[in-house]
Amino acid sequence: MVNFLPIFHPRIEADVREAMAYYEERSPGLGARFKRTFYETMDEILVFPEKHAVKIDGEIRTRLMRPFPYLVFYAVENDIVFALTVQYAGRRPAFLRAIAKERRAT
């Protein structure tokens, strides 16, 4: 079994904090649940990183963070999983693709 190393884009923490604040404002404790769900989703991605289809530029994949309507965008290269961004799934697809591509380039 391959052990995949996660590398988080420097701005992904801000993505998570922004979503946490949104949910916490709506219901106390929901922000912490969002954060747990993000890390649980990342754990699942690290176990089977190639499970989800490539969606952008032949290398960027997405994983829905159920029950939250957020997508984790990531890329797999050798034994590394690059977590690029976490974004609300209801945003325009072109906007989501642009963010993921920009972060993959940096």
Image (spheres, rainbow, N blue to C red):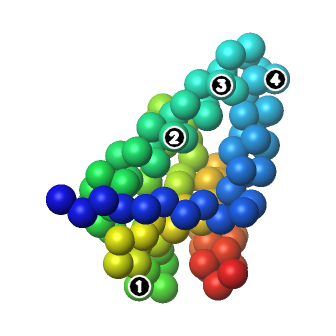
The residue labelled by disc 3 is 32
At label 4, which amino acid type do we have?
Glu
Question: Residue at position x 45%, y 37% from top?
Answer: 40
Along the polypeptide, which appears first: circle 3 or circle 1?
Answer: 3
Task: For label 2, count other residues whose C-alpha is less than 10 Å away and answer few (under 14), some (14-19) or many (20+).
Answer: few
Along the polypeptide, which appears first: circle 4 or circle 3?
Answer: 4
Q: Give the x, y percent position of residue 79.
A: 35, 71
At label 3, which amino acid type do we have?
Ala
Task: For label 4, count other residues whose C-alpha is less than 10 Å away and answer few (under 14), some (14-19) or many (20+).
Answer: few
Q: Is residue 15 above or below residue 60?
A: above
The residue labelled by disc 4 is 25
- Depth check: give the residue in front, 92 or 65: 65
- In the image, taking residue 87 as reference, residue 66 lies left or right, namely left
Q: CA distance from mark 2 to mark 4?
A: 21 Å
Q: Give the x, y percent position of residue 47.
A: 30, 52
Question: Residue at position x 43%, y 54% from top?
Answer: 63
Q: CA distance from mark 4 to mark 1?
A: 37 Å
Task: For label 3, count other residues whose C-alpha is less than 10 Å away and answer few (under 14), some (14-19) or many (20+).
Answer: some
The residue labelled by disc 2 is 39
Residue furthest to the top: 28
Q: CA distance from mark 3 to mark 2?
A: 11 Å
Tag 4 and tag 1, C-beta contact below 8 Å: no
At label 2, which amino acid type do we have?
Tyr
Circle 4 or circle 3, nearest the eye: 3
Q: Quadrant of the N terminus?
A: bottom left
